Protein backbone atom coordinates (compact mmCIF):
# COMPACT_ATOMS: atom_id res chain seq x y z
CA UNK A 1 0.00 0.00 0.00
CA UNK A 2 1.32 3.48 -0.82
CA UNK A 3 2.31 5.70 2.06
CA UNK A 4 0.05 8.67 2.64
CA UNK A 5 0.95 12.22 3.51
CA UNK A 6 -0.46 14.99 5.63
CA UNK A 7 -0.06 18.58 4.61
CA UNK A 8 -0.90 20.95 7.44
CA UNK A 9 -1.70 24.04 5.43
CA UNK A 10 -1.88 27.60 6.65
CA UNK A 11 -3.78 29.52 3.98
CA UNK A 12 -3.19 32.99 5.37
CA UNK A 13 -5.89 35.58 5.96
CA UNK A 14 -8.33 34.01 3.52
CA UNK A 15 -8.09 35.81 0.19
CA UNK A 16 -6.50 34.30 -2.89
CA UNK A 17 -3.81 36.97 -3.15
CA UNK A 18 -2.26 36.02 0.16
CA UNK A 19 -2.17 32.25 -0.04
CA UNK A 20 1.22 30.74 -0.95
CA UNK A 21 1.85 28.73 -4.08
CA UNK A 22 2.95 25.78 -1.98
CA UNK A 23 -0.35 25.89 -0.11
CA UNK A 24 -2.32 25.85 -3.37
CA UNK A 25 -0.19 22.97 -4.70
CA UNK A 26 -0.77 21.01 -1.49
CA UNK A 27 -4.52 21.59 -1.62
CA UNK A 28 -4.72 20.62 -5.27
CA UNK A 29 -2.85 17.34 -4.89
CA UNK A 30 -4.83 16.26 -1.83
CA UNK A 31 -7.44 13.52 -1.87
CA UNK A 32 -8.99 14.87 1.33
CA UNK A 33 -9.35 18.39 2.67
CA UNK A 34 -10.11 18.51 6.37
CA UNK A 35 -10.95 21.68 8.23
CA UNK A 36 -13.31 23.89 10.18
CA UNK A 37 -16.30 24.51 7.93
CA UNK A 38 -15.86 28.32 7.74
CA UNK A 39 -12.27 27.85 6.59
CA UNK A 40 -13.22 25.12 4.12
CA UNK A 41 -15.70 27.53 2.51
CA UNK A 42 -12.92 30.10 2.10
CA UNK A 43 -10.70 27.77 0.04
CA UNK A 44 -13.26 25.41 -1.50
CA UNK A 45 -12.97 26.99 -4.95
CA UNK A 46 -9.23 26.22 -5.02
CA UNK A 47 -9.44 22.48 -4.55
CA UNK A 48 -10.31 19.45 -6.59
CA UNK A 49 -10.24 16.96 -3.71
CA UNK A 50 -12.44 13.93 -3.87
CA UNK A 51 -13.57 14.49 -0.35
CA UNK A 52 -13.91 17.52 1.85
CA UNK A 53 -14.41 16.98 5.56
CA UNK A 54 -15.63 20.07 7.36
CA UNK A 55 -16.41 19.97 11.04
CA UNK A 56 -17.39 22.35 13.82
CA UNK A 57 -15.09 24.72 15.60
CA UNK A 58 -14.45 22.64 18.70
CA UNK A 59 -13.72 19.44 16.83
CA UNK A 60 -10.00 19.99 16.23
CA UNK A 61 -8.98 16.66 17.74
CA UNK A 62 -11.37 14.66 15.59
CA UNK A 63 -10.10 16.55 12.52
CA UNK A 64 -6.52 15.64 13.36
CA UNK A 65 -7.46 12.02 14.02
CA UNK A 66 -9.36 11.76 10.76
CA UNK A 67 -6.39 13.24 8.88
CA UNK A 68 -4.04 10.65 10.38
CA UNK A 69 -6.51 7.85 9.62
CA UNK A 70 -6.82 8.83 5.96
CA UNK A 71 -3.09 9.35 5.51
CA UNK A 72 -2.37 5.97 7.05
CA UNK A 73 -4.81 4.52 4.55
CA UNK A 74 -2.52 5.84 1.82
CA UNK A 75 -4.24 9.14 0.98
CA UNK A 76 -2.87 12.60 0.64
CA UNK A 77 -4.64 14.84 3.13
CA UNK A 78 -4.59 18.57 3.70
CA UNK A 79 -5.54 19.78 7.16
CA UNK A 80 -6.22 23.46 6.88
CA UNK A 81 -5.82 26.37 9.26
CA UNK A 82 -6.34 30.04 8.59
CA UNK A 83 -3.25 32.17 9.12
CA UNK A 84 -0.26 29.98 9.85
CA UNK A 85 -0.89 26.33 10.71
CA UNK A 86 1.91 26.50 13.28
CA UNK A 87 0.55 29.57 15.11
CA UNK A 88 -2.55 28.56 17.10
CA UNK A 89 -3.28 26.27 14.11
CA UNK A 90 -3.56 22.53 13.53
CA UNK A 91 0.13 21.61 13.18
CA UNK A 92 0.77 20.92 16.85
CA UNK A 93 -2.39 18.85 17.24
CA UNK A 94 -1.59 16.69 14.22
CA UNK A 95 1.84 15.93 15.67
CA UNK A 96 0.31 15.20 19.08
CA UNK A 97 -2.10 12.65 17.56
CA UNK A 98 0.76 11.06 15.61
CA UNK A 99 2.99 10.87 18.69
CA UNK A 100 0.18 9.10 20.59
CA UNK A 101 0.30 6.46 17.88
CA UNK A 102 4.08 6.07 18.11
CA UNK A 103 4.77 7.83 14.80
CA UNK A 104 8.33 8.57 13.72
CA UNK A 105 9.39 10.61 10.74
CA UNK A 106 11.49 7.76 9.40
CA UNK A 107 8.86 5.08 9.44
CA UNK A 108 5.55 6.89 9.60
CA UNK A 109 3.53 8.85 7.09
CA UNK A 110 5.05 12.03 5.66
CA UNK A 111 4.05 15.30 7.28
CA UNK A 112 4.62 18.74 5.79
CA UNK A 113 3.65 21.95 7.52
CA UNK A 114 2.99 24.62 4.89
CA UNK A 115 3.45 28.08 6.40
CA UNK A 116 0.95 30.87 5.90
CA UNK A 117 0.63 34.52 6.85
CA UNK A 118 -0.45 34.75 10.48
CA UNK A 119 -2.80 37.46 11.75
CA UNK A 120 0.00 39.39 13.43
CA UNK A 121 1.56 39.91 10.00
CA UNK A 122 -1.56 40.44 7.92
CA UNK A 123 -3.05 42.86 10.47
CA UNK A 124 0.26 44.68 10.87
CA UNK A 125 0.42 45.27 7.12
CA UNK A 126 -3.04 46.86 7.19
CA UNK A 127 -2.19 49.04 10.18
CA UNK A 128 1.14 50.33 8.84
CA UNK A 129 4.26 48.94 10.52
CA UNK A 130 3.49 48.29 14.19
CA UNK A 131 5.62 45.14 14.54
CA UNK A 132 8.99 46.68 13.71
CA UNK A 133 10.39 45.81 17.10
CA UNK A 134 10.19 42.83 19.47
CA UNK A 135 6.66 41.54 19.55
CA UNK A 136 4.62 38.64 20.85
CA UNK A 137 1.27 37.02 20.29
CA UNK A 138 -1.03 36.16 23.19
CA UNK A 139 -4.27 34.28 22.78
CA UNK A 140 -6.89 35.45 25.25
CA UNK A 141 -8.76 32.18 24.92
CA UNK A 142 -8.77 30.46 28.30
CA UNK A 143 -10.57 27.46 26.87
CA UNK A 144 -7.37 25.38 26.89
CA UNK A 145 -5.04 27.60 28.94
CA UNK A 146 -5.67 28.69 32.55
CA UNK A 147 -6.43 32.41 32.83
CA UNK A 148 -3.81 32.79 35.58
CA UNK A 149 -1.12 31.80 33.04
CA UNK A 150 -2.50 34.14 30.38
CA UNK A 151 -2.58 36.95 32.95
CA UNK A 152 1.12 36.39 33.73
CA UNK A 153 2.00 36.43 30.05
CA UNK A 154 0.17 39.71 29.51
CA UNK A 155 1.90 41.26 32.50
CA UNK A 156 5.33 40.01 31.39
CA UNK A 157 4.80 41.31 27.85
CA UNK A 158 3.54 44.64 29.18
CA UNK A 159 6.50 44.94 31.54
CA UNK A 160 9.02 44.03 28.81
CA UNK A 161 7.53 46.58 26.39
CA UNK A 162 6.64 44.09 23.66
CA UNK A 163 4.30 45.03 20.87
CA UNK A 164 1.46 42.59 21.53
CA UNK A 165 -0.98 40.98 19.11
CA UNK A 166 -3.95 39.58 21.01
CA UNK A 167 -5.59 36.66 19.22
CA UNK A 168 -9.08 35.42 20.19
CA UNK A 169 -9.77 38.57 22.22
CA UNK A 170 -13.48 38.03 22.73
CA UNK A 171 -16.36 35.72 21.93
CA UNK A 172 -20.03 35.46 22.88
CA UNK A 173 -19.19 33.85 26.21
CA UNK A 174 -15.70 35.33 26.78
CA UNK A 175 -16.16 39.05 27.22
CA UNK A 176 -14.16 39.77 30.38
CA UNK A 177 -10.70 38.71 29.12
CA UNK A 178 -10.01 41.75 26.94
CA UNK A 179 -11.16 44.03 29.80
CA UNK A 180 -8.66 42.35 32.13
CA UNK A 181 -5.93 42.54 29.49
CA UNK A 182 -6.49 46.29 29.16
CA UNK A 183 -6.40 46.71 32.94
CA UNK A 184 -3.04 44.92 33.20
CA UNK A 185 -1.53 46.85 30.28
CA UNK A 186 -2.59 50.19 31.76
CA UNK A 187 -0.41 49.45 34.78
CA UNK A 188 2.64 49.64 32.52
CA UNK A 189 1.70 51.64 29.46
CA UNK A 190 0.47 55.10 28.78
CA UNK A 191 -3.31 55.23 28.13
CA UNK A 192 -2.49 56.97 24.85
CA UNK A 193 -0.53 53.95 23.56
CA UNK A 194 -1.67 53.29 19.98
CA UNK A 195 -3.86 50.24 19.43
CA UNK A 196 -5.05 48.80 16.12
CA UNK A 197 -8.19 46.67 15.87
CA UNK A 198 -8.36 44.63 12.69
CA UNK A 199 -11.42 42.57 11.96
CA UNK A 200 -11.42 40.00 9.13
CA UNK A 201 -8.14 41.13 7.58
CA UNK A 202 -8.20 40.82 3.78
CA UNK A 203 -11.69 39.35 3.84
CA UNK A 204 -14.92 40.82 2.59
CA UNK A 205 -15.94 42.38 5.90
CA UNK A 206 -12.53 43.78 6.74
CA UNK A 207 -12.68 46.61 9.28
CA UNK A 208 -9.77 48.58 10.72
CA UNK A 209 -9.92 50.87 13.74
CA UNK A 210 -7.05 52.95 15.09
CA UNK A 211 -7.55 53.78 18.74
CA UNK A 212 -5.69 53.98 22.02
CA UNK A 213 -5.22 51.66 24.94
CA UNK A 214 -7.61 53.79 27.00
CA UNK A 215 -10.29 53.88 24.30
CA UNK A 216 -10.05 50.45 22.73
CA UNK A 217 -12.99 48.92 24.60
CA UNK A 218 -15.30 51.57 23.18
CA UNK A 219 -15.00 49.85 19.80
CA UNK A 220 -16.37 46.60 18.48
CA UNK A 221 -14.04 43.70 19.32
CA UNK A 222 -15.14 40.18 18.43
CA UNK A 223 -13.97 36.70 17.56
CA UNK A 224 -12.57 37.79 14.22
CA UNK A 225 -10.68 40.77 15.62
CA UNK A 226 -6.94 40.90 16.23
CA UNK A 227 -5.91 43.57 18.73
CA UNK A 228 -2.43 45.01 18.12
CA UNK A 229 -1.09 47.05 21.05
CA UNK A 230 1.95 49.23 20.37
CA UNK A 231 5.00 49.51 22.60
CA UNK A 232 6.13 52.69 24.38
CA UNK A 233 7.55 54.18 21.19
CA UNK A 234 4.75 53.29 18.77
CA UNK A 235 3.02 56.28 17.22
CA UNK A 236 0.29 57.15 14.76
CA UNK A 237 1.13 59.05 11.62
CA UNK A 238 -1.33 59.83 8.85
CA UNK A 239 -3.65 57.00 9.81
CA UNK A 240 -0.80 54.52 10.13
CA UNK A 241 0.49 52.82 13.25
CA UNK A 242 4.29 52.78 13.28
CA UNK A 243 6.81 51.34 15.71
CA UNK A 244 10.32 52.66 15.16
CA UNK A 245 13.22 50.21 15.09
CA UNK A 246 15.27 51.69 17.92
CA UNK A 247 14.88 53.24 21.36
CA UNK A 248 16.97 56.28 20.63
CA UNK A 249 15.91 58.64 17.92
CA UNK A 250 18.42 61.09 16.53
CA UNK A 251 16.72 63.89 14.72
CA UNK A 252 17.58 67.09 13.05
CA UNK A 253 15.53 70.05 12.00
CA UNK A 254 12.77 68.74 9.80
CA UNK A 255 14.39 65.41 9.05
CA UNK A 256 14.14 62.03 10.68
CA UNK A 257 17.26 59.99 10.11
CA UNK A 258 19.32 57.10 11.38
CA UNK A 259 22.80 58.52 11.40
CA UNK A 260 24.79 55.61 12.82
CA UNK A 261 27.15 54.08 10.33
CA UNK A 262 27.84 50.34 10.68
CA UNK A 263 31.19 50.84 12.41
CA UNK A 264 29.59 53.14 15.00
CA UNK A 265 26.99 50.63 16.09
CA UNK A 266 27.26 49.01 19.52
CA UNK A 267 30.04 51.44 20.49
CA UNK A 268 29.53 52.70 24.04
CA UNK A 269 29.25 56.33 23.03
CA UNK A 270 26.64 55.57 20.37
CA UNK A 271 24.61 52.74 21.88
CA UNK A 272 25.41 52.67 25.60
CA UNK A 273 22.69 50.12 26.38
CA UNK A 274 24.36 47.29 24.44
CA UNK A 275 25.91 44.27 26.20
CA UNK A 276 29.63 44.76 26.81
CA UNK A 277 31.31 41.90 24.92
CA UNK A 278 34.22 41.69 27.38
CA UNK A 279 32.47 42.01 30.73
CA UNK A 280 29.06 40.59 29.82
CA UNK A 281 27.49 43.57 31.58
CA UNK A 282 25.00 46.02 30.10
CA UNK A 283 24.41 49.52 31.42
CA UNK A 284 21.23 49.81 33.47
CA UNK A 285 18.56 52.44 33.24
CA UNK A 286 17.63 51.94 29.60
CA UNK A 287 15.37 48.98 30.42
CA UNK A 288 13.15 51.37 32.35
CA UNK A 289 12.10 53.33 29.31
CA UNK A 290 8.51 54.12 30.18
CA UNK A 291 7.71 50.58 31.30
CA UNK A 292 7.74 51.18 35.06
CA UNK A 293 4.53 50.24 36.75
CA UNK A 294 2.61 53.47 36.97
CA UNK A 295 -0.71 54.82 38.05
CA UNK A 296 -2.34 56.00 34.82
CA UNK A 297 -3.27 59.43 36.20
CA UNK A 298 0.40 60.23 36.81
CA UNK A 299 1.36 59.78 33.20
CA UNK A 300 1.71 63.02 31.31
CA UNK A 301 2.00 62.54 27.56
CA UNK A 302 5.06 64.36 26.23
CA UNK A 303 5.74 65.87 22.87
CA UNK A 304 7.38 63.44 20.48
CA UNK A 305 10.89 64.15 19.22
CA UNK A 306 9.45 64.60 15.73
CA UNK A 307 6.96 67.16 17.00
CA UNK A 308 9.79 69.01 18.71
CA UNK A 309 11.95 68.96 15.60
CA UNK A 310 9.03 70.15 13.48
CA UNK A 311 8.36 72.94 15.92
CA UNK A 312 12.02 73.96 15.90
CA UNK A 313 12.07 73.91 12.11
CA UNK A 314 9.05 76.13 11.95
CA UNK A 315 10.88 78.61 14.19
CA UNK A 316 13.86 78.65 11.85
CA UNK A 317 11.93 78.81 8.62
CA UNK A 318 9.22 81.05 10.11
CA UNK A 319 6.58 78.69 8.76
CA UNK A 320 3.28 78.08 10.49
CA UNK A 321 3.48 75.17 12.87
CA UNK A 322 1.96 72.09 11.32
CA UNK A 323 -0.68 70.32 13.35
CA UNK A 324 1.03 67.42 15.18
CA UNK A 325 -0.21 64.06 14.04
CA UNK A 326 1.68 61.87 16.51
CA UNK A 327 -0.15 60.76 19.59
CA UNK A 328 2.92 60.07 21.61
CA UNK A 329 6.45 58.90 21.37
CA UNK A 330 8.81 58.48 24.26
CA UNK A 331 12.42 58.03 23.27
CA UNK A 332 15.75 59.37 24.31
CA UNK A 333 16.18 62.23 21.88
CA UNK A 334 19.39 63.55 20.37
CA UNK A 335 18.87 66.79 18.52
CA UNK A 336 21.20 67.38 15.56
CA UNK A 337 21.68 70.82 14.14
CA UNK A 338 24.32 72.65 12.09
CA UNK A 339 25.51 76.15 12.93
CA UNK A 340 27.80 78.68 11.29
CA UNK A 341 28.45 82.39 11.83
CA UNK A 342 26.91 83.18 8.43
CA UNK A 343 27.07 82.45 4.73
CA UNK A 344 30.01 84.74 4.09
CA UNK A 345 31.14 85.42 7.65
CA UNK A 346 33.76 82.98 8.89
CA UNK A 347 34.42 84.62 12.27
CA UNK A 348 33.05 83.20 15.51
CA UNK A 349 32.63 85.58 18.41
CA UNK A 350 33.71 84.58 21.94
CA UNK A 351 30.05 84.78 22.97
CA UNK A 352 29.10 82.32 20.22
CA UNK A 353 31.81 79.90 21.34
CA UNK A 354 30.68 80.16 24.97
CA UNK A 355 27.09 79.52 23.92
CA UNK A 356 28.14 76.43 21.97
CA UNK A 357 30.05 75.08 24.97
CA UNK A 358 27.12 75.76 27.32
CA UNK A 359 24.50 74.26 25.06
CA UNK A 360 26.43 71.17 24.02
CA UNK A 361 26.82 69.82 27.56
CA UNK A 362 27.11 66.03 27.27
CA UNK A 363 26.62 66.17 23.54
CA UNK A 364 29.18 66.59 20.78
CA UNK A 365 30.44 69.35 18.49
CA UNK A 366 31.98 68.46 15.14
CA UNK A 367 33.52 70.83 12.65
CA UNK A 368 32.66 69.66 9.13
CA UNK A 369 34.06 70.31 5.64
CA UNK A 370 30.83 72.23 4.95
CA UNK A 371 32.03 75.20 7.05
CA UNK A 372 29.57 74.29 9.78
CA UNK A 373 29.70 72.94 13.30
CA UNK A 374 27.29 70.07 13.79
CA UNK A 375 25.90 69.80 17.32
CA UNK A 376 24.42 66.59 18.71
CA UNK A 377 22.66 67.48 21.93
CA UNK A 378 20.53 65.27 24.19
CA UNK A 379 17.46 67.38 24.84
CA UNK A 380 13.72 67.42 25.13
CA UNK A 381 13.60 71.07 24.17
CA UNK A 382 15.15 71.74 20.73
CA UNK A 383 13.13 74.91 20.42
CA UNK A 384 15.06 76.48 23.28
CA UNK A 385 18.36 75.44 21.70
CA UNK A 386 17.45 77.00 18.36
CA UNK A 387 16.38 80.21 20.08
CA UNK A 388 19.64 80.46 22.05
CA UNK A 389 21.73 79.84 18.93
CA UNK A 390 19.85 82.52 17.03
CA UNK A 391 20.19 84.97 19.92
CA UNK A 392 23.95 84.98 19.31
CA UNK A 393 23.48 85.38 15.54
CA UNK A 394 24.25 81.87 14.46
CA UNK A 395 22.94 80.66 11.13
CA UNK A 396 21.03 77.50 12.14
CA UNK A 397 20.37 74.73 9.62
CA UNK A 398 19.22 71.13 9.51
CA UNK A 399 21.75 68.41 8.68
CA UNK A 400 21.46 65.41 6.40
CA UNK A 401 20.17 65.39 2.83
CA UNK A 402 19.59 69.11 2.60
CA UNK A 403 20.84 72.01 0.52
CA UNK A 404 23.82 73.82 2.02
CA UNK A 405 25.22 77.12 0.70
CA UNK A 406 29.00 77.39 1.13
CA UNK A 407 30.42 80.76 0.28
CA UNK A 408 33.98 82.08 0.29
CA UNK A 409 34.95 84.87 2.68
CA UNK A 410 34.91 87.45 -0.14
CA UNK A 411 38.50 88.42 0.72
CA UNK A 412 37.35 89.31 4.23
CA UNK A 413 34.64 91.50 2.81
CA UNK A 414 36.79 93.41 0.33
CA UNK A 415 34.90 91.86 -2.55
CA UNK A 416 31.45 92.10 -1.02
CA UNK A 417 29.38 92.98 -4.10
CA UNK A 418 27.90 89.51 -4.51
CA UNK A 419 27.29 88.69 -0.84
CA UNK A 420 23.58 89.64 -1.03
CA UNK A 421 23.07 87.03 -3.75
CA UNK A 422 24.73 84.34 -1.59
CA UNK A 423 22.49 85.35 1.29
CA UNK A 424 19.42 85.29 -0.95
CA UNK A 425 20.27 81.72 -1.99
CA UNK A 426 20.73 80.71 1.64
CA UNK A 427 17.44 82.35 2.64
CA UNK A 428 15.47 80.55 -0.05
CA UNK A 429 17.18 77.18 -0.29
CA UNK A 430 19.29 76.68 2.86
CA UNK A 431 18.15 73.53 4.67
CA UNK A 432 15.78 72.44 1.87
CA UNK A 433 15.26 68.68 2.00
CA UNK A 434 16.46 66.95 -1.15
CA UNK A 435 17.05 63.40 -2.41
CA UNK A 436 20.71 63.75 -1.39
CA UNK A 437 22.89 66.40 0.23
CA UNK A 438 23.51 69.23 -2.25
CA UNK A 439 26.22 71.85 -1.89
CA UNK A 440 25.93 75.19 -3.59
CA UNK A 441 29.42 76.72 -3.72
CA UNK A 442 29.47 80.47 -4.08
CA UNK A 443 32.74 82.33 -4.77
CA UNK A 444 33.15 86.09 -5.00
CA UNK A 445 35.59 86.29 -7.92
CA UNK A 446 37.13 84.34 -10.76
CA UNK A 447 39.90 83.02 -8.49
CA UNK A 448 37.24 80.68 -7.11
CA UNK A 449 39.69 79.87 -4.33
CA UNK A 450 36.98 78.20 -2.23
CA UNK A 451 36.55 75.72 -5.09
CA UNK A 452 32.95 76.44 -6.03
CA UNK A 453 33.54 74.57 -9.29
CA UNK A 454 33.94 71.41 -7.22
CA UNK A 455 30.48 71.65 -5.73
CA UNK A 456 27.16 70.26 -6.94
CA UNK A 457 26.21 73.72 -8.07
CA UNK A 458 29.08 76.20 -8.43
CA UNK A 459 28.52 79.94 -8.72
CA UNK A 460 31.36 82.33 -9.50
CA UNK A 461 30.89 86.10 -9.54
CA UNK A 462 32.91 87.72 -12.31
CA UNK A 463 32.70 91.14 -13.92
CA UNK A 464 29.36 91.87 -12.18
CA UNK A 465 27.83 88.71 -13.62
CA UNK A 466 27.73 85.06 -12.66
CA UNK A 467 29.17 81.90 -14.14
CA UNK A 468 27.26 78.76 -13.28
CA UNK A 469 28.60 75.20 -13.01
CA UNK A 470 26.64 72.06 -12.25
CA UNK A 471 27.35 68.43 -11.49
CA UNK A 472 30.80 68.19 -9.86
CA UNK A 473 31.86 64.92 -8.32
CA UNK A 474 33.78 66.41 -5.45
CA UNK A 475 35.27 63.32 -3.85
CA UNK A 476 36.66 59.92 -4.74
CA UNK A 477 39.35 58.71 -7.10
CA UNK A 478 37.13 59.63 -10.03
CA UNK A 479 36.41 63.16 -8.78
CA UNK A 480 35.87 65.85 -11.39
CA UNK A 481 34.88 69.48 -11.61
CA UNK A 482 31.39 70.66 -12.41
CA UNK A 483 30.34 71.38 -15.95
CA UNK A 484 30.22 75.07 -16.92
CA UNK A 485 26.69 75.71 -18.19
CA UNK A 486 26.24 79.50 -18.16
CA UNK A 487 28.71 82.35 -18.44
CA UNK A 488 27.82 85.97 -17.75
CA UNK A 489 24.43 85.42 -16.15
CA UNK A 490 22.67 88.65 -15.14
CA UNK A 491 22.45 88.88 -11.31
CA UNK A 492 18.66 89.08 -11.30
CA UNK A 493 18.51 85.77 -13.18
CA UNK A 494 20.66 83.86 -10.69
CA UNK A 495 18.12 82.88 -8.01
CA UNK A 496 15.37 81.95 -10.52
CA UNK A 497 17.78 79.74 -12.47
CA UNK A 498 19.10 77.98 -9.34
CA UNK A 499 15.48 77.51 -8.26
CA UNK A 500 14.61 75.77 -11.53
CA UNK A 501 17.63 73.45 -11.28
CA UNK A 502 16.93 72.57 -7.64
CA UNK A 503 13.23 72.01 -8.30
CA UNK A 504 13.95 69.70 -11.22
CA UNK A 505 16.47 67.72 -9.18
CA UNK A 506 14.15 67.53 -6.18
CA UNK A 507 11.22 66.32 -8.26
CA UNK A 508 13.00 63.78 -10.43
CA UNK A 509 16.14 62.43 -8.75
CA UNK A 510 16.06 59.03 -7.12
CA UNK A 511 16.51 58.91 -3.35
CA UNK A 512 20.23 59.11 -2.54
CA UNK A 513 21.16 60.19 -6.08
CA UNK A 514 23.64 63.05 -6.10
CA UNK A 515 23.25 65.82 -8.64
CA UNK A 516 26.15 64.62 -10.83
CA UNK A 517 24.64 61.14 -11.00
CA UNK A 518 21.24 62.55 -11.82
CA UNK A 519 22.73 64.73 -14.57
CA UNK A 520 24.61 61.75 -16.01
CA UNK A 521 21.44 59.63 -15.97
CA UNK A 522 19.00 62.11 -17.51
CA UNK A 523 21.59 63.75 -19.81
CA UNK A 524 19.80 67.10 -19.64
CA UNK A 525 18.92 69.53 -16.87
CA UNK A 526 16.69 72.35 -18.12
CA UNK A 527 18.29 73.08 -21.50
CA UNK A 528 21.82 72.14 -20.41
CA UNK A 529 23.13 69.02 -22.15
CA UNK A 530 25.31 66.69 -20.11
CA UNK A 531 29.01 66.57 -20.94
CA UNK A 532 31.17 63.83 -19.42
CA UNK A 533 33.63 65.76 -17.27
CA UNK A 534 35.23 62.62 -15.86
CA UNK A 535 38.79 61.87 -16.82
CA UNK A 536 39.25 59.54 -19.75
CA UNK A 537 41.87 57.63 -17.76
CA UNK A 538 40.34 54.34 -16.68
CA UNK A 539 40.37 54.16 -12.90
CA UNK A 540 38.35 52.10 -10.45
CA UNK A 541 36.25 54.05 -7.96
CA UNK A 542 37.26 53.16 -4.39
CA UNK A 543 34.69 53.14 -1.57
CA UNK A 544 35.46 54.50 1.88
CA UNK A 545 38.13 52.48 3.68
CA UNK A 546 39.68 50.97 0.55
S1 LIG B 1 37.01 83.47 -4.36
FE1 LIG B 1 37.75 85.49 -4.82
S2 LIG B 1 36.50 86.80 -3.49
FE2 LIG B 1 36.30 84.76 -2.69
S3 LIG B 1 37.90 84.64 -1.15
FE3 LIG B 1 38.75 83.80 -3.04
S4 LIG B 1 39.80 85.51 -3.99
FE4 LIG B 1 38.42 86.38 -2.44
Image (cartoon, grey):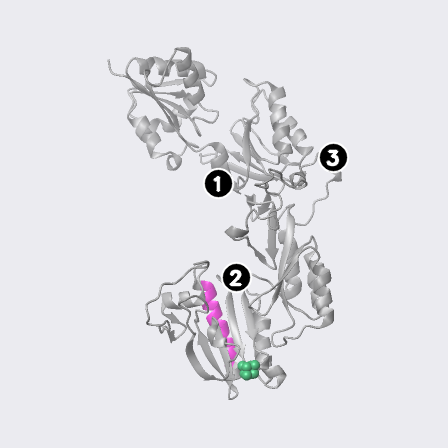
Mark 1 and mark 3 residues within 8 Å of each other at the beta carbon: no
Category of crowding for the residue at label 1, using alpha-carbon neighbours closer than 10 angstroms: few (below 14), some (14–19), many (at least 20): some
Which SS class for mark 3? loop
* Distance CA(mark 2)–CA(mark 3): 42 Å
Q: Residue 131, position in %: x, y?
A: 53, 39
300 displayed left or right of 403? right
Magenta run includes residue 499: yes
Category of crowding for the residue at label 3, using alpha-carbon neighbours closer than 10 angstroms: few (below 14), some (14–19), many (at least 20): few
Q: Quadrant of the N terminus?
A: top left
Q: Which is more foreground, mark 2 or mark 3? A: 2
Which SS class for mark 2? loop
Q: Which residues are magenta?
A: 493-507
Q: Is 185 in front, or is 324?
A: 185
Disc number placed over residue 125 in the picture, else none: 1
Q: Residue 118, position in %: x, y?
A: 46, 32
Q: Quadrant of the C terminus?
A: bottom left
Q: Is 323 in front, or is 30?
A: 30
Amino acid sequence: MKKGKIFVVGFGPGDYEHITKRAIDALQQSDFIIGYKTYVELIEHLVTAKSIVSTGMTEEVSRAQEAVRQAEAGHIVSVISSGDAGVYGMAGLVYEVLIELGWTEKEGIAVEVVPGISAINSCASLLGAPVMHDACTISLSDHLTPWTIIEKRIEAAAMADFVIAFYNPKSGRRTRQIVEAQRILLQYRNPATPVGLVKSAYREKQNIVMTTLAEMLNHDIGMLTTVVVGNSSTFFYDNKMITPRGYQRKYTLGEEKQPLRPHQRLKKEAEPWALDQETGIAATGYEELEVKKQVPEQIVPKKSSFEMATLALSLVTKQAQPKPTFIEQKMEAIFEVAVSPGVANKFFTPEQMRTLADLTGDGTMEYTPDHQIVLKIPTDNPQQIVERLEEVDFLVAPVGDVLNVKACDFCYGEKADSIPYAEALQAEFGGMKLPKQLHVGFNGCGMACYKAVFDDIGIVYRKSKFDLFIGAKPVGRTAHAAQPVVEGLAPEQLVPLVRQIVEEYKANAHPNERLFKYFKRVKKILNFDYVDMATKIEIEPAPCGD
